C-alpha cells in the first residue's frame, strides 16, 4: 500500500506569543481601512489631494503586509491568529478599495466582483481546511497580491492620459493572476483535506473499523 504523504503546502502549528509586532502590524492595517475609505470617497472622489493621501495610506498598509509576515517568519513569531488575520486584513483593504473605486465609477463593477468572489472564496476555504492545516501562500498568490496592489494604486491616483490607459492592462494582469491562483488554492485545499495528519488518522480508523467488521463477519460465517 502506498504511503500518503502530508501536503507540503500545509505549515505545522507553531507556538508564539499572540501579542507581538507582526500581529500588531496586521491589526494596524485593519484599523486604517476606515481612514483609507474616507480619503478615497471624500468629495465623491473629486478631491485630488484626498486621492493622493488615500494612495499613501494604501501603500503604507501594503508595506506592512510585506513586513509583518517577514518579521514573523524570521523571529519565530508565527501564530495561528496571524495566519488567519493577515489575509483577512488584506482582503478588507483591497475590498474597500475596489468597492470604493467602482462606486465612484472609476472601475467596472464586474472586475470588483470577480476579485471579491475569489478572495471571499479563498477565505472560506481557509476556514474549511483549518482543522487540517494552513496553506502557505504560493508564488502565484504572491504575484497576484503585488499585481492587485499596483493596479489598485494606479486607479486610486488621479491619473490622466497614457498612465490612465496603462493601468487597465495592469488590472487585466491582476485579474488573470487572481483567477489562476484561486483555482490553484482550491486544488491545494482539496489535497490537504485528503493528506493531512488528521485525514490520514481518520482514514486509518475507518480501515481499522472495516477490518474489524470483516473479521466479525468471517467468524460468523465460520460459526454457521
Image (tube, rainbow, N blue to C red):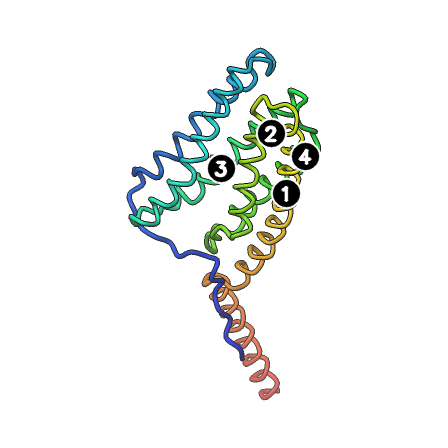
For marks 1 and 3, give the one nearer the viewer.
1
Image quadrant where one finds the C terminus = bottom right
Residue 64 locus on image (x, y percent):
40, 35
User: Sequence order check: which comes first, mark 3 or mark 4?
Assistant: 3
Residue 135 locus on image (x, y percent):
49, 53
Q: Kindly report the distance in space between the C-alpha atoms of the residues bearing marks 3 and 4.
A: 20 Å
Q: Which residue is mark 1?
A: 173
Name the side, left or right, on which 168 lies relative to 60.
Answer: right
Q: Kindly report the distance in space between the C-alpha atoms of the residues bearing marks 2 and 1.
A: 16 Å
For marks 4 and 1, give the one nearer the viewer.
1
Q: How many marks?
A: 4
Q: Which residue is mark 4?
A: 111
State yes or no: discs 4 and 1 in contact (Cβ < 8 Å): no
Picture layout, residue 85 above or below residue 182: above
Picture layout, residue 103 above or below residue 222: above
Could you say which is closer to the camera, residue 162 or residue 36?
162
Q: Secondary structure at mark 2?
A: helix
Q: Kindly report the distance in space between the C-alpha atoms of the residues bearing marks 4 and 1.
A: 12 Å
Could you say which is closer to the camera, residue 153 or residue 37?
153
The tag on residue 88 is 3
User: Sequence order check: which comes first, mark 2 or mark 1?
Assistant: 2
Q: Residue at x 34, y 52 (%)?
A: 14
For marks 2 and 3, give the one nearer the viewer.
2
Amino acid at each position: 500500500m502506498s504511503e500518503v504523504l502530508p501536503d507540503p503546502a500545509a505549515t505545522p502549528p507553531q507556538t508564539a506569543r499572540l501579542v507581538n509586532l507582526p500581529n500588531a502590524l496586521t491589526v494596524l492595517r485593519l484599523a486604517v481601512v476606515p481612514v483609507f475609505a474616507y480619503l478615497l470617497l471624500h468629495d465623491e472622489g473629486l478631491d485630488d489631494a484626498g486621492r493622493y493621501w488615500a494612495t499613501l495610506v494604501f501603500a503604507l498598509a501594503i508595506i506592512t503586509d510585506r513586513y509583518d509576515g517577514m518579521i514573523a517568519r524570521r523571529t519565530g513569531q508565527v501564530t495561528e491568529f496571524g495566519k488567519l488575520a493577515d489575509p483577512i486584513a488584506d482582503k478588507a483593504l483591497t475590498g474597500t478599495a475596489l468597492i470604493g473605486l467602482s462606486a465612484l465609477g472609476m472601475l467596472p463593477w464586474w472586475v470588483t466582483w470577480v476579485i471579491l468572489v475569489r478572495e471571499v472564496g479563498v477565505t472560506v476555504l481557509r476556514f474549511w481546511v483549518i482543522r487540517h492545516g494552513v496553506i502557505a501562500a504560493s508564488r502565484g498568490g504572491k504575484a497576484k497580491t503585488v499585481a492587485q496592489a499596483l493596479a489598485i494604486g494606479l486607479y486610486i491616483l488621479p491619473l490622466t492620459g497614457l498612465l490612465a490607459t496603462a493601468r487597465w492592462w495592469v488590472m487585466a494582469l491582476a485579474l488573470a493572476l487572481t483567477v489562476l491562483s484561486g483555482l490553484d488554492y482550491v486544488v491545494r485545499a482539496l489535497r490537504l483535506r485528503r493528506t493531512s495528519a488528521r485525514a490520514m488518522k481518520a482514514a486509518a480508523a475507518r480501515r481499522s473499523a472495516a477490518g474489524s467488521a470483516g473479521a466479525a463477519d468471517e467468524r460468523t460465517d465460520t460459526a454457521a
